[in-house]
Amino acid sequence: MTPRILRLAATGAGLAAAASAYDTTGGTWASGDIVLHLQLGRPATPLPDGAADWNAVAAGALDEWNAQLGRSRLVPVPDSNAEVRNGNRINNVVLRPDVFGTAFDSRTLAVTIGFTNRATARFTEQDVVFNSNLTWSSYRGPLRAGTRDLRRVALHEFGHVLGLDHPDEATPPQTVSAIMNSTVGNLEALTADDIAGARALYTTGSSGPLPTLPVIVAQPQSRTVPVGGSYTFSVTATGSGPFTYAWFFRADGSLFAESLPFAIGASYTLGSVQRGDAGTYTAYVRGPGGLTLSNAARLTVSSGPALTPATQLANLSTRGRVEGGVGVLIAGLAVTGSAPKSVLVRAAGPALAGVGVADALPGPRLRMVGGDGRTLAENEAWDAAGAGPAVAAAAQRLGAFPFAAGSRDAALLLTLAPGTYTAVIAGGDPRGGTALVEVYDAEPAATGRRLVNIATRGWIAGETHVLIAGLVVTGPGPRTYLIRGVGPTLLRPPFNLAEALRDPQLELFRGETLLRENDDWDTPLNGMAALRAAAAATGAFALAETRDNFLRTGLDGAMLVTLTPGNYTAKLSGFGGDAGVGLIEVYEVP
């Protein structure tokens, strides 16, 4: 007996539209009439939509669902005097101050609670209880402050009676426009997702044999993989489809498992296994006939080659959007050691058009700022004032792609004392465009002086405008790096950046191969301690550890990865189309 609860949303905003699929509870009614005893009584004052009483409101909601059903029909018994009790095999629809003796919490509007024959997966009772401690009405249009619309809540609860669950609380959560989502909003009618769910469960002619449970015929396999290696867990199921998949991970030493938000297929690959991935992985396979769990596969992570302090970052770069007018791309970098270091800093715009970037920034302006806020140097034409030969020679020696003579790409060849610096890339063109900021270690053979991090801030809009950080790792062996995609923390003091990205998504690639991805740095939980320690060791600011429910934010993305020498790309985008200012950071962990 599992209650289905509808809660009041934090805001009155409409539910987001997207694409996925309805969710089900795993049970249905047998074909035929589903009788519901409407025992809601009468309101104290006339209802805005003209309904005669609460039972008439509920009956109208039942009619909306009946228009989508084939083999069954919801049959109301208005003003019923049937016994009201949970477990009496009568489907009671009532207004009560409690759920058969259990108190409502302050945000719960209604509950559907019932019983299912586990042998047949058929419902035997479904009671709907509306919270009588609240003020109710029945109206059309957006939600109204101070009163609840019983009609749209009844639509939701009767979906539970039929066997539909909350798609936004599915495993994994779905982002769909649906009356069946777990919080009430401005939606007041069934959506395509709700209708698809009802038709899937009650299509005409589906009164024959019940769908069968998924049967797993190939279980995920346990493996021992070194740090940096690749591991794919997979499962094969037969039975009544279609199937949806969710994978759960229980870290070694943890008492509980947690879902992997991106592992939603029959297989999932960890392209670069890290120590925190050690543990067990279990697949949840759901179909029309119910849910089946796979065996738990154990991933054991062995030590790879020893970390090499001599390995370093030879080149750091970030590609992002510079908005027209006052928009900028801001890259921060740090130089360590006891003596000055030569670096080549470039801002590519026109040169990007030659490699297929359609909206390249026509004329980037590069300004280098010291830790004290003073401007050290500026440039908006890389070969102006006689600087071209030295810049071109350094670029060729360091493997940077060449700038065309006379182009409006910008570059500075500088000697920087140990400390922190900021490269600011602006574009005077009102159209804006995409720019690439690059920082090269111009003397990689020097010992004791090195580039240790880059952090770039810029505008992000879903998958259309993203920040892409490139890093080149050189040396004799692997080294560990902290990579972060920051947004929600920037909303808070001391940053207070109102336009910050609310839900960043961070991905790491080597070539076209996805190595790692992270949406919230508390997933998985066992990795948070190491991420905190790495941030402290590198001097990175602490990330927010709680979500802002009022602003509806996620958490920042972060990963701690051991990388072998090679070229890598980290991409920061807005999860689910989110837009705002984001910060992508790459730190060398000492």
Image (tube, rainbow, N blue to C red):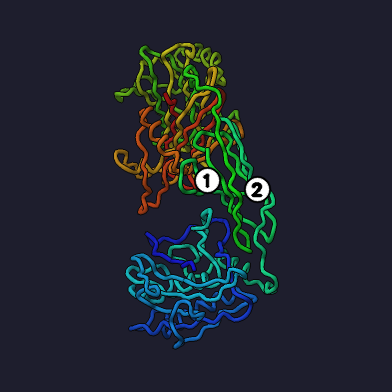
Rendered location of residue 385, percent (x, y):
44, 14
Q: Nearer the viewer, residue 536 or 150?
A: 536
Q: Give the numbered dot on residue 61.
A: none
Residue of label 1: 249
Residue drawn 68% across and 61% down? 240
Task: Determine whether 164 is above or below 273 in the image.
Answer: below
How crowded pointer 2 is (Cα within 10 Å; few <14, some 14-19, many 20+) is rated as some
Rendered location of residue 217, percent (x, y):
69, 52
Left or right: residue 568 compared with residue 6: right
Rendered location of residue 364, percent (x, y):
46, 28
Rendered location of residue 71, percent (x, y):
65, 76
**Residue 404 seen in the figure:** no
How crowded pointer 1 is (Cα within 10 Å; few <14, some 14-19, many 20+) is rated as many
Q: Nearer the viewer, residue 271 or 199?
A: 271
Alpha-carbon span between mark 1 and mark 2: 15 Å
Q: Amino acid at mark 2?
A: Gln
Image quadrant where residue 139 sits: bottom left
Which type of secondary structure does the marked residue at label 2 adopt? loop
**Residue 484 seen in the figure:** yes
Residue of label 2: 219
Task: Determine whether 268 is above or below 549 in the image.
Answer: above
Report the number of numbered marks: 2
Q: Earlier in the sequence, mark 1 or mark 2?
A: 2
Image quadrant where residue 106 sits: bottom left
Left or right: residue 195 compared with residue 546: right
Badge 1 vs badge 2, beta-carbon distance below 8 Å: no
Q: Amino acid at mark 1?
A: Phe
Which type of secondary structure does the marked residue at label 1 adopt? strand
